[in-house]
Image (cartoon, grey):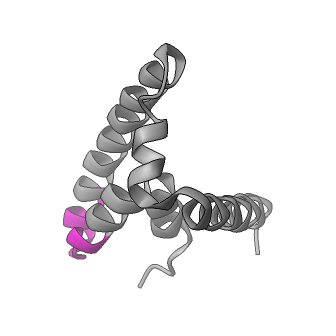
Amino acid sequence: MSGVKAFLWLVALALSASSLWVLLQVGYLGIWQGGFANLGSTQITPDLVIACGIAMGLIVRDCRAKGRTWRPWAALTAVGGSLGLLAYLLWPKR
């Protein structure tokens, strides 16, 4: 396993654990409500949505070029944010 892939696994596992804990504390809607709780979080939330949208566009282009389906990755990113992007990067390519 390359150093980059090992790092991505570490990030994905840490983010997954953190996200699960937050999800259990406040629920899915609570996460979104927190994303608009004050001016700081209202700035960060749209920025992250835009970044994930751009990354999904790159994933769609990559999948189409390789003859793979992109819809599961788009759905996973829409629901789980960067966890969907990390999953795409870590999923074995065939």
Q: Residue furthest top?
A: 39
Direction bottom: furthest residue? 94
Closest to the observer, 52 or 6: 52
Indicate the quadrant containing the N terminus: top left, top right, bottom left or bottom right. bottom right
Q: Quadrant of the C terminus?
A: bottom left
At x 67%, y 64%, the residue is 21
Name the side, left or right, on which 24 lies relative to 78: right
Tell me where residue 14 sits by quadrant: bottom right
On screen, residue 47 versus residue 87, left or right, reads left
Vertical placement of 85 versus 48: above or below?
A: below
Segment tinted magenta in the rendering: 62-72
Quarter residue 77 falls in: bottom left
Above or below: residue 48 compared with residue 4:
above
Q: Position of residue 50 (x, y in %)?
A: 33, 33
Residue in front for this viewpoint, 32 or 12: 32
Q: Is residue 69 located in the magenta-colored stretch of the structure?
A: yes
On the image, the x and y values in percent for residue 22 come to 62, 58
Q: Residue at x 27, y 74 (%)?
A: 72
Q: Main secondary structure of the magenta part?
A: helix
Q: Residue at x 55, y 63 (%)?
A: 23
From the viewer's perspective, tell me whether residue 50 is left or right of residue 7.
left
| Residue 34 at x, y percent in the picture | 49, 38
Q: Quadrant of residue 47?
A: top left
Q: Residue at x 53, y 61 (%)?
A: 86
x, y percentage for residue 40?
53, 17
State the count of labels.
Answer: 0
